[in-house]
Image (tube, grey):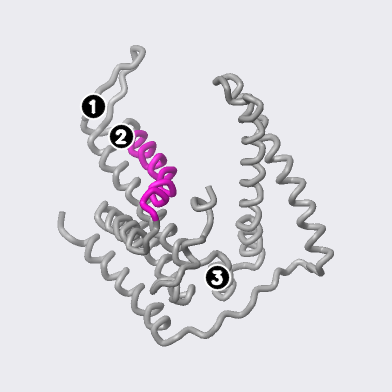
Amino acid sequence: MFELFSDIFACRENALTRIDPRPKLIIAFSLILAIVLSQRVLLPSFAAVAAVGTMLVLRIPLKLVLLRLSAPVGIVVALVVLRAFLTPGTPLVVLTPLGYTITATEEGLISGIVLGSRVLGAVSVVLLLSSVTPAHKIFAALRWFRVPEGWVEIAFLVYRYVFVLLEQASDVQAAQKARLGHSSIRRSLSSIGILAGTVMARSIDQAFRTHEAMMLRGYQGRYPFGPLAGMSRVDRWLAGVAPCFVVAAFLVVERWPK
């Protein structure tokens, strides 16, 4: 769980981690925007494959990459199925569960695949960004881009304390297992409910304690972020040229004849 949610790999020394976070944010944003606006599968799929391939080249374990992509893949499968069965068009598969007739259409399947590829491509870009840029540098870069202070501060605190709540949830679950709280399906459902309630109560208590601690340390409604160093010539070149390549690739792929 620590490797799944931490940015330990972003602290390694490699060619991508040495790049300033500001051009990386610009490139990631331009890629995500192009993926979201894309009407074909090619660009989002290429972005997903390139992002996953880059993570593997950086020696991020394949098992960890697959675990991080497992939730988005589940969402993609649900989107494809829903689109296939809820979009009218040419019948592809007809099912009759419990006497009801539901039909999967070709147009719905294609639309679902395009939508799912967007989700997978955008998530892969975000995962790559988080794998080569520590979180505190991302927050500092967002402040440099004049993102509202309140948004950045809330995101920073959420990132900081989500690990505390994960640790508390892990401790409660270990205690439940030691007391046979997951020995049957019925007891497991009850234990999961208790776990969720306990974590919620502790999160509220943690919020009060964190606020009191910040006030005692002189918090006055504004969280200070240190200044970023100036960008090198290579970083400025990446920030200016790389988005142009993304726009060019988007135009070529979208206007390419089917």
Q: Nearer the viewer, residue 54 or 153?
A: 54
Residue 233: x %, y % from top left: 41, 87
Residue marked by disc 3: 137
Q: What is the C-alpha distance between the residues marked 2 and 1?
A: 9 Å
Whether 81 is among the magenta residues is yes
127 over 99 or under it: above or below: below
* Magenta-tinted stretch: 61-84
Q: Position of residue 2 (x, y in %)?
A: 54, 51
Residue at the farthest left position: 257
Q: Amino acid at mark 3?
A: Lys
Q: Amino acid at mark 2?
A: Ala
Crowding around mark 1 (Cα neighbors within 10 Å: few <14, some 14 to 19, many 20+) is few
Residue nearest the observer in this picture, 89 or 49: 49
Whether tag 2 and tag 1 are in contact, CB under 8 A, the answer is: yes
- Percent across and percent down for residue 133 are 48, 67
Left or right position of 124 against 180: left
| Residue at the disc numbered 1 | 93
Q: Residue at x 42, y 50 (%)?
A: 64
Q: Earlier in the sequence, mark 2 or mark 3?
A: 2
